[in-house]
Amino acid sequence: MVNLPSTASIVTATDGLPFKLSASRVYHAPTLEAAGTGGKPSVLKLDVSSSDLPPTDTWFGAVGVPASQRAAARAALQGLWEAWRANGLLRVTGTLKAGDQGAQFGNIRVVADDFALKDHPGVRELGAPAHPLEDQAEAGKLFYHKGDGNIACYGYGAGIAMSTMDALCAAGGRPANFLDGGGGATEANVRAAMELILADAGADVIFVNSFGGLTKMDLIAAGAVAFINERRAAGGHIPPIVMRLRGTGEEEAREILQKAAIPEVEYIGDMKEAANRAVELSLPGAKKRGIKTSPPQPAPPASRPVLFARDGQYERTIPNLKVQKDDPVLVVGLGKASQANSTVASEYGTNIVGASAPRKGGSEFLSKPVFNDVATATRALRPRIASVFAPPAAAADTIIECIAAEVPLIVSYAEGVTQHDQLRVQAALRSQGKSRLIGANCPGAIFPHQRVKLGIQPLRVHAPGIVGLISRSGTISYDLAAQTTALGLGQSAVFGLGGDPFPGTRSWEALKVLLEDPLTKIVCLVGEVGGQMEEEAAAVYADYVSALPAGTVAKPVVGFVAGAATQRGKTYGHAGAVWWDDSETAAAKRKVLANAGFVMAPTIGDIGGLIKDEVDRLELDTHQEPSPQVAFG
């Protein structure tokens, strides 16, 4: 349970100083914010690793707290800060009223980190009652929100799950829910998901849509078939089901579905066709239920100014994102996922020079030496890249260990790193100028020309080519790699940055590298709701275009923002996509990117075609065959 500060009482009154204590995606740190003189926000940056507030007198002065009340106000906020740190909180809003008798908080609202709740179960008791299906989803360790439509959705990865909802809305349908199965399917996980969506009495159609990297599509298919057959045998109703399972295990999944021959199941590989079919099947039920199939979209607000550093010491590590063939790679962690993906990477051509794993020093992996810790391995092997497969509880400390060892490029694939741990990593990154991180929760990066694979991507959908891909969503990055490979365009580089609120590399930083890269002829950038990464990318691209010499054609960028069907204040998926004000919506971000010169796609199913249109319009050379020795960037 959250221990509210003993130095302040909680009241229902709303008078006092409105404040916000939150994990700031602008400052990459916790901040205390209130309106200052003239209504402009005054921000006090906090240290996530310190239990004490920094000096507050200047901030209190800026927000109008009289000197006589500051001791009481500070004591109250100190207690709140301790509660914030101790309970995995992300956002606390309310009012603070200080006086001679102490301080009072009013109208308190609390948002906690889903991944921290397992360590602080009492925090959940503060929440509003959930929909029964949301309680069922939580019991099954699924990420779920109930919607008001009649097409039940299910996939793996927040980006693909949000984009599935977007595609259904664009086709004239209404999703019944958001459901992200997480970072990887298991037999129990698939069963829980199928049971959940089939329990929704308001769902007339089911749309299962996923693109697998680490997640195996054949496992989803087998689990779905087994559950459907059991449900039929028990006399349960089976609605029409559209399935699109691409990526790892795709062929096996199709074989399983064909062999099962379930009459209600249709397999459709194309995203737009699958979404259109699901909507077509849903229309009779939607009419019967009185569901409005095309909700009006609010006009996006005027673009907001964005604040971000471009030339700090950490930003000077952006060139570390450029990867060359035979760059030495140290594998950090030797669990099953690490061994499987690192073996594939080595066979692909990635130069793995060794590994580090606790208590495994002195052994070998891929005929290379293994050390007990990163520091020892780094001194012996001098790797340029650390490929980090650490469990979520250990990920932050492992990344910080790599930073201390000054590894130039660190790529981490942990699933479920708490945001407080992400903030600790941000503090470590921004205190130095030697190491650059992609992650901590991301699919990784792949450089087809150099044959360097860092991560959990399905290798089969990638090919050397001209398209530079940047995506906050891992599953969408796989989908786009498949689209561009099928079109004969291939990829120059793929940056799967991860959907976490505090990524080690932001969209604009990867964009800057690709705009300078001679092998990249066109860029595709995919964002999500929340934060300001898309606005940052728009500002960087606009500056790039304005700086071009007269008559020079700008390198084109095709864009997409997932999450048009999401709701304010709700966290979507295992990476935690969430937006709080209208400027963070998909509609607002799409407008900002379009104004900067991006060619915007309405759905992910449209992206490949738009990239091809731009290639044809500009008559870009698609037949380059650069030597693998050519350095990226």
Image (cartoon, rainbow, N blue to C red):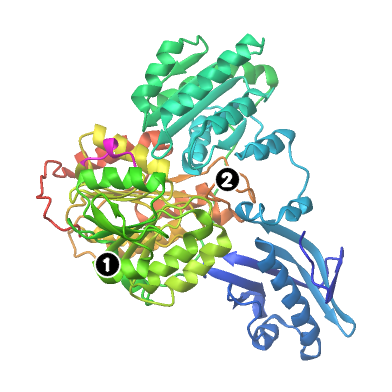
Magenta part of the chain: 457-463
Q: Is residue 522 left or right of residue 334?
A: left
| x and y percentages locating residue 618 in the rendered image | 19, 45
In percent of the image, x 52 and y 12: which residue is there? 264
Is residue 518 shown in magenta? no
For mark 2, does the 10 Å Cα neighbourhood hold few (<14), some (14 to 19), or many (20 or more) residues? many
**Disc 1, disc 2: CB below 8 Å?**
no
In percent of the image, x 61 and y 72: which residue is there? 31
SS at badge 1: helix
| x and y percentages locating residue 199 in the rendered image | 67, 24
For mark 1, does the 10 Å Cα neighbourhood hold few (<14), some (14 to 19), or many (20 or more) residues? some
Residue with the mark numbered 2: 572
Q: Is residue 87 left or right of residue 428?
A: right
Q: Is residue 238 above or below residue 462?
A: above
The one nearer the camera, 353 or 408, is 353
| x and y percentages locating residue 6 in the rendered image | 83, 73
Residue with the mark numbered 1: 319
For the C terminus, which image quadrant?
Answer: bottom left
Is residue 531 shown to the viewer in this render?
no
Q: CA distance from mark 1 to mark 2?
A: 32 Å
Q: Is residue 558 above or below residue 6?
A: above
The one nearer the camera, 561 or 194, is 194
Q: Is residue 449 above or below residue 532?
A: above
In percent of the image, x 54 and y 57: which residue is there? 393
Q: Earlier in the sequence, mark 1 or mark 2?
A: 1
